[in-house]
Image: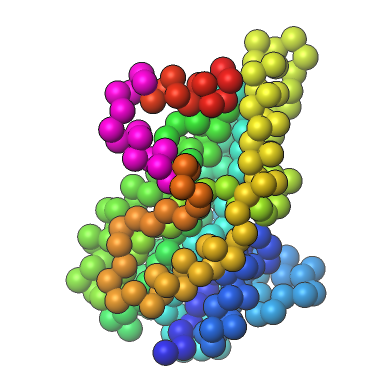
Amino acid sequence: MSKIILITGGSSGIGKSIGEFLTQKGHTVYGTSRNPERITNSKFPLVALDVRNVESIEKAVAEVIAKSGRIDVVINNAGVGITGPLEEIPTSEIKNNFETNFFGPIEVMKAVLPQMRSQKSGLIINITSIAGYMGLPYRSVYSASKGALELITEALRMEVKEFGIHITNVAPGDFATNIASGRFHAPLINGSAYEKPYGNTLKMMDEHVDSGSNPNEMAIAIHKIIQTPNPKVHYKVGVFMQKFSIVLKRILPDKVYEKMLMNHYKL
């Protein structure tokens, strides 16, 4: 059955791959971009939306409803990366990251829930991250923003279940996208106490993204979830070791797991 689907951040990366795949499967897909007029090669329509602006969110949701009469699926995909020693990341950048990765998805959910409640049906898929399951060195803010979205989803699922609305998390690992070019990098400061370890970790993170999985894997996973009558609370999509790291965190003593991470990042 064809569904009306709204994807935030649908002009590039994972969002674009998901949108193209779902369009091929016969669904009506609306993506979003802060500046859709600049995107000339999208295979599905883009509406203007900035997840940091509530008025923008409400206008985009109203536009989709006006055009299609309903919204069956919302994929909260818009997000930004951020790296750096916590001590050296400007507080303004920390707040901006949470505005995009955490408060933005909350406002999108608030905007679509009344429509889904009136339909007595709907599915919200929040794209989080495997990094949200653990505090990663020099990615503290990113881990925190994605981890917070995971927990919000767990709670909200129970609040809206009686209305026929399903909400789930999908946590991707490293995928070959342009996220590295768009993330905020706290600058490497000559003479900083963190200069060498942060520099080495930053290089490793960029290599992981460059050698990441094909974003189509996420698109296939999302399509399967949309076809699932009763989605699970959490899904993880990525290579085995990235998903297994979450299992290890559950079963290993905290200090053993911490040591394992520090060895991985050569700290």
Residue 248 magenta-highlighted:
yes
Any part of residue 46 in sight = yes
* Left or right of 244 in this view: 66: right
For the C terminus, the quadrant is top right
Q: Judge whether 163 appears above or below 208 on screen.
A: below
For the N terminus, the quadrant is bottom left
State which region is magenta. Answer: 243-256
Q: Judge whether 164 appears above or below 200 on screen.
A: below
* Left or right of 70 in this view: 95: right
Residue drawn where x is 27% and y is 53% of the image:
155
Residue 202 magenta-highlighted:
no
Residue drawn where x is 64% and y is 36% of the image:
205
Residue drawn where x is 73% and y is 65% of the image:
35
Given residues 106 and 56, the one toward you in this image is: 106
Name the quadrant containing residue 258: top left
Q: Judge whether 243 appears above or below 89 on screen.
A: below
Given residues 160 and 127, the one toward you in this image is: 127
